Amino acid sequence: MTPIALERRSDGLLLGRFTAMACPCELLFDGIAPKAAQMLFDQAVAQVQAIEHKYSRYRQGNLCHRINQSQGQPVALDEETVRLLRFADACYRLSDGLFDLTSGVLRRAWHFDGSDRLPEAATINALLPFVGWDKVRFDEKTVCLPRGMELDFGGIGKEYAVDRVIQWMATHAGDGAVLVNLGGDIAVTGPRVGGQPWQVGIRQGGSLGPTLTLAGGALATSGDTERFLLKEGVRYSHLIHPKTGWATRGGPGQITVAGKSCLQAGLLSTLALLHGREAEAFIQAQAVPYWLSPTTDSA
């Protein structure tokens, strides 16, 4: 990896930028000497890249690829992956099947390019037998997927990376403070040096939305501002309902949720959008701070 030098911002914070997981990423350092901040940043980039290399479904030969090409045969797991699968299993059960790591196979039918081209119902129905977390078997050593099924870690990979990095920073940043931002999923080690909260601007579509204060925990944002279909005034979100195979519609254009961890916040923001027109009622019932942008569905 070519070293990426940190920049000194006008407010005194040190900023490091890089690209991973198909999105722009940045870290902010407050009250940390440049040499120490550079070492922390380099370690953070390495951690994020390692997670991407291991779990991306777009890479050949990695663990995700081996699982998805296993043709019903067991694949050996390490402790990290077992923990992720346990989390996915808990999310599946708590969400009554709305959160499902096997639903990524439905993207073979959907191409969210902003056009009006919806898939045929027959195409979706042909894929539904390959969806269903309850068909996956795993234990402390192996995972076994039925032939034709796949796992897609995209729904938790970025949030998991944020949590991993911020936990490491909390241990190694000393008395300084760090903000991690991976494509809009954000966590902080705590308030800034001096006790004031971080100021976080949330993008809504192509413009800057509200500025939020964050003194601890994480923020995660889900929405359809970049990936969607639009047909006869109806906007179809890139989030696909795993039970029906159809893209969700009628919900807010975007939702940002605060949580103790980025995984928690990301899960809730995703589940909210999967509830479509009931998104706000769902997130209100979770008793967490949230921010909505208006629905983009005119039907």
Image (cartoon, grey):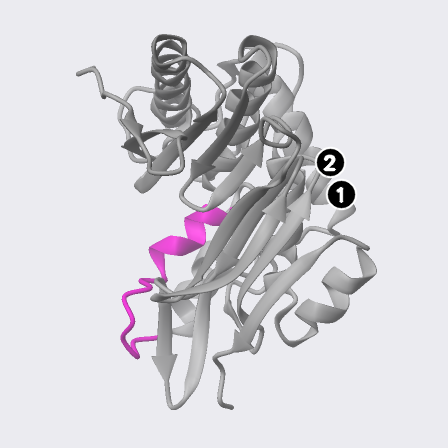
The structure residue drawn at horizontal position 36% and vertical position 62%, both measured from the top left corner, is: 227
Q: According to the image, label 2 marks what residue?
A: 90
- The residue segment tinted magenta is 103-119
Tag 1: residue type?
Arg
Marks 1 and 2 in Cβ contact (< 8 Å)? yes
Q: Closest to the observer: 162 or 236?
A: 162
Residue 108's place in the image compared with 259, above or below, is: below
Whether residue 216 appears in this view of the structure is yes
Q: Name the residue nearer the viewer: 15 or 293.
A: 15
Q: Residues within 10 Å of mark 2 (few under 14, many from 20)?
A: few
Q: Is residue 139 left or right of residue 205?
A: right
Q: Which residue is mark 1?
A: 93
Name the main secondary structure of what is drawn in magenta.
loop
Q: Secondary structure at mark 1?
A: helix
Q: Is residue 141 left or right of residue 233?
A: right
The amino acid sitting under disc 2 is Ala
Task: Determine the image quadrant of residue 101.
Answer: top right
